[in-house]
């Protein structure tokens, strides 16, 4: 649960929308500003907050909120 | 976001806070459209990698340095497409500045292993011709200034340390290209030393492989503030927004401890003490700045005699009283003292840089004199010099011999004021100066100084028209223009070029397009000498009337009445010529013989 909350903070910060509420299927379709450039921004912020490093493949494949949560759950456990 | 919030946000940007910078950039893009764009400068950014984020950050930093920018974003990897096709969007946009962001992968062919010098030379020539072609094309289509980044040397070294050993290696070759392009560039191209910034932040941090493969970013988003800051400073300098004077505090700034308590011998300047050495190191850096033309001033809360004592009596001091152009020590508040310094040196408050270890003093200056650049002085004197060097308030477009002798001549000026008292009247004093003037039509040798004076002068500037190298070159090849420079020397110093004039012939009228003068030589009768030259040139050009114009700005009120004083008459508009302008006031001298001249004491050469 806390991963989702922390992630929500980051999304709100990057997309500058304090009312943003995450749901698992949420993807670039649902947020106007979410493009390949903000995607990198998002990745950098998440890496910093959770102290993890994503591989290129992970960055490419992680396209919605649920996938981010799954990935982070695995990476943090390691 | 209102103006106050924006100002505060810009003041508080942290160069490493890339997310904050990008967010502010995004908000600016939305609010900036609401601002009137009259004064904005048109900048086109072209790049072989993605430039979207850079533009966002650049917008922030340009505004931080008071530049409103209208920015054109080139297509991804579209440098050639934009620059080489005549009807491209780039040329429709008609930029004043083109910024070309290069990347080492733009270099497609590198010399083979064991290539000889001749072969490497051929490769270099090919890269040169590629960029020459680009620059020429851009210059033909629009009169703009070009900034181009040098190549950042990649950290992927095939040969390891051998890259440095062999001249044919890729890294050595790229270094050579950087130097080669620098040698072969035309005047209106300036290089941005991006490789320095990459080294400064560290190449391990600079290159972000994931970001490159994902979205073709030439450098990590984390360093975007560093890049934008550097570029914005260079553009600001190009627009003539330059800082000229470093104002220094004394206690715990130039030396350790408080001279009022410890005495001139008790302050810490001990080369054998690490802290003393740090202060000496800072003094040396400050002296180096002075030697490149930065004017030094002191502003200290102290009794004047006590404050001066270390400069006179303490042998360990690196700076001497002669290095300081304006020395103020009293118990008044620093913001009024800074005003005093600006007025004594005859420079704008916005050309001051303030360096004080006391955060409270810095806050006061920031609050009451927001135009002053306040250095974010670190707590530790060990880092004084490197922080000042990194903030780099003195980013100029060029240095000239005049700059270097300038800080010297300010000091001479001060001496002159003190010796002034022994004369019966001012004219006697002027005669005693033995001033000499050298008047000439400009040539290549002095075009740099000509350009600098036109673009940097704010106070004695009748129309504040800014021109670039290409325009000046064009004018000097045009029969209808006369470009004149006046150099002055006196028995104390050599001032170099202090006044520039551009005259344009409009049928039988001679229009004073530009008249600027350095404030260092005000009240010396040079105006009269210049006016005499204007009349003389007007006659040579076959004109029988002269028209001048005064376009008011916040800084040039001092020349408001100059044409009236010379006997010109105000006129509303002039038919038959292109002289009319809605911005300024026009003045006509109907009869060249009716000029009202004051005597001057300058011999002409």
Image: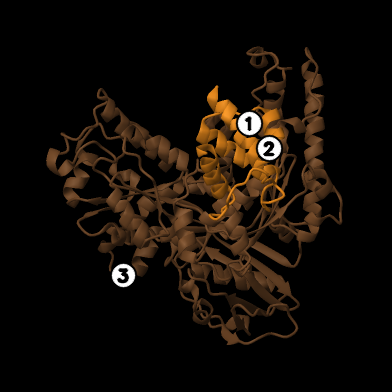
Chain colours: A orange, B brown
Instruction: Find disc 3 in the rendering and name its residue.
Output: B425
Please determine whether, in this image, residue B243 is positioned above or below residue B391. below
Residue B360, position as x, y percentages in the image: 28, 52
Q: Are marks 3 and 1 on the same chain?
A: yes
Distance between mark 1 and mark 2 Cα atoms? 8 Å
Residue B567, position as x, y percentages in the image: 53, 83
Picture quarter containing residue B415?
bottom left
> Are the residues flagged by discs 1 and 2 in contact, CB closer than 8 Å?
yes
Under tag 3, what secondary structure?
A: loop
Instruction: Find disc 2 in the rendering and name its residue.
Output: B217
The crowd level at tag 1 (other Cα within 10 Å; few <14, some 14-19, many 20+) is: some
Instruction: Find disc 1 in the rendering and name its residue.
Output: B208
The crowd level at tag 2 (other Cα within 10 Å; few <14, some 14-19, many 20+) is: many
Q: Nearer the viewer, residue B576 or B268?
A: B268
Distance between mark 3 and mark 2 Cα atoms? 68 Å
Under tag 1, what secondary structure?
A: loop
Chain of the residue displaying label 1? B
- Residue B220 visible in the displayed image: no
Picture quarter containing residue B108?
top right
> Are the residues flagged by discs 3 and 1 in contact, CB closer than 8 Å?
no
Q: Earlier in the sequence, mark 3 or mark 2?
A: 2
Residue ID at (26%, 30%): B276
Under tag 2, what secondary structure?
A: loop
Picture quarter containing residue B336?
bottom left
Residue ID at (56%, 37%): A46
């Amino acid at each position: 649960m806390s991963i989702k909350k922390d992630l929500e903070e980051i999304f709100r910060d990057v997309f500058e929308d304090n009312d943003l509420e995450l749901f698992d299927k949420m993807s670039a379709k649902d947020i106007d500003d979410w493009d390949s450039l903000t995607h990198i921004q998002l990745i950098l912020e998440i890496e910093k907050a959770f102290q993890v490093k994503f591989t290129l493949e992970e960055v490419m494949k992680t396209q919605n909120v649920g996938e981010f949560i799954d990935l982070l759950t695995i990476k943090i456990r390691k | 976001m209102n103006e106050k919030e924006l100002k505060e946000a810009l003041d508080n940007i942290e160069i490493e806070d890339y997310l904050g910078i990008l967010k502010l950039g995004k908000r600016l893009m939305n609010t900036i459209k609401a601002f009137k764009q009259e004064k904005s400068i048109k900048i086109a950014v072209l790049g072989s990698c993605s430039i979207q984020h850079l533009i966002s950050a650049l917008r922030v930093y340009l505004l931080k340095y008071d530049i409103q920018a209208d920015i054109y974003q080139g297509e991804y990897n579209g440098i050639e497409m934009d620059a080489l096709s005549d009807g491209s969007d780039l040329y429709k946009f008609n930029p004043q500045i083109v910024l070309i962001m290069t990347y080492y992968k733009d270099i497609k062919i590198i010399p083979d292993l064991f290539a000889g010098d001749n072969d490497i030379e051929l490769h270099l020539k090919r890269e040169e011709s590629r960029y020459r072609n680009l620059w020429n094309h851009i210059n033909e289509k629009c009169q703009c200034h070009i900034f181009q980044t040098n190549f950042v040397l990649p950290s992927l070294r095939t040969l390891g340390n051998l890259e440095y050993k062999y001249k044919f290696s890729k890294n050595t070759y790229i270094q050579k290209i950087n130097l080669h392009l620098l040698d072969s560039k035309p005047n209106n191209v300036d290089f941005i030393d991006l490789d320095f910034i990459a080294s400064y932040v560290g190449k391990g941090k600079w290159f972000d492989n994931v970001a490159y493969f994902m979205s073709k970013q030439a450098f990590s988003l984390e360093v975007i503030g560093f890049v934008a800051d550097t570029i914005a400073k260079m553009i600001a300098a190009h627009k003539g927004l330059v800082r000229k004077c470093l104002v220094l505090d004394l206690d715990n700034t130039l030396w350790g401890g408080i001279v009022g308590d410890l005495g001139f011998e008790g302050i810490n300047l001990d080369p054998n003490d690490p802290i003393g050495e740090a202060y000496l190191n800072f003094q040396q850096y400050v002296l180096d700045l002075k030697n490149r033309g930065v004017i030094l001033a002191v502003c200290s809360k102290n009794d004047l005699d006590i404050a001066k004592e270390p400069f006179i009596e303490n042998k360990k001091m690196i700076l001497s009283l002669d290095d300081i152009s304006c020395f103020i020590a009293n118990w008044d508040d620093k913001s009024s003292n800074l005003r005093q310094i600006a007025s004594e040196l005859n420079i704008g408050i916005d050309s001051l840089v303030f360096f004080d270890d006391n955060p409270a003093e810095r806050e006061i200056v920031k609050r009451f004199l927001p135009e002053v650049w306040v250095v974010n002085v670190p707590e530790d004197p060990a880092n004084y010099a490197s922080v000042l060097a990194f903030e780099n308030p003195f980013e100029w477009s060029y240095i000239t011999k005049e700059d270097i002798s300038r800080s010297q001549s300010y000091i001479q000026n001060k001496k002159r004021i003190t010796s002034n008292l022994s004369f019966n009247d001012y004219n006697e004093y002027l005669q005693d100066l033995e001033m000499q003037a050298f008047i000439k039509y400009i040539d290549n040798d002095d075009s740099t100084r000509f350009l600098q004076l036109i673009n940097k002068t704010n106070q004695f500037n009748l129309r504040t028209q800014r021109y670039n190298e290409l325009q000046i070159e064009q004018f000097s090849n045009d029969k209808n223009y006369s470009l004149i420079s006046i150099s002055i020397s006196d028995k104390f110093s050599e001032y170099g070029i202090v006044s520039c004039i551009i005259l344009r012939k409009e049928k039988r009228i001679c229009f004073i397009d530009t008249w600027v003068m350095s404030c260092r030589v005000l009240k010396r009768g040079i105006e009269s000498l210049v006016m005499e030259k204007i009349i003389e040139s007007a006659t040579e050009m076959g004109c029988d009337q002269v028209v001048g114009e005064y376009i008011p700005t916040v800084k040039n009120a001092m020349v408001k009445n100059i044409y009236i004083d010379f006997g010109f008459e105000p006129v509303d508009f002039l038919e038959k010529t292109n002289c009319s302008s809605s911005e300024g006031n026009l003045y006509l001298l109907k009869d060249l013989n009716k000029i009202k001249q004051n005597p001057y004491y300058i011999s002409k050469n």
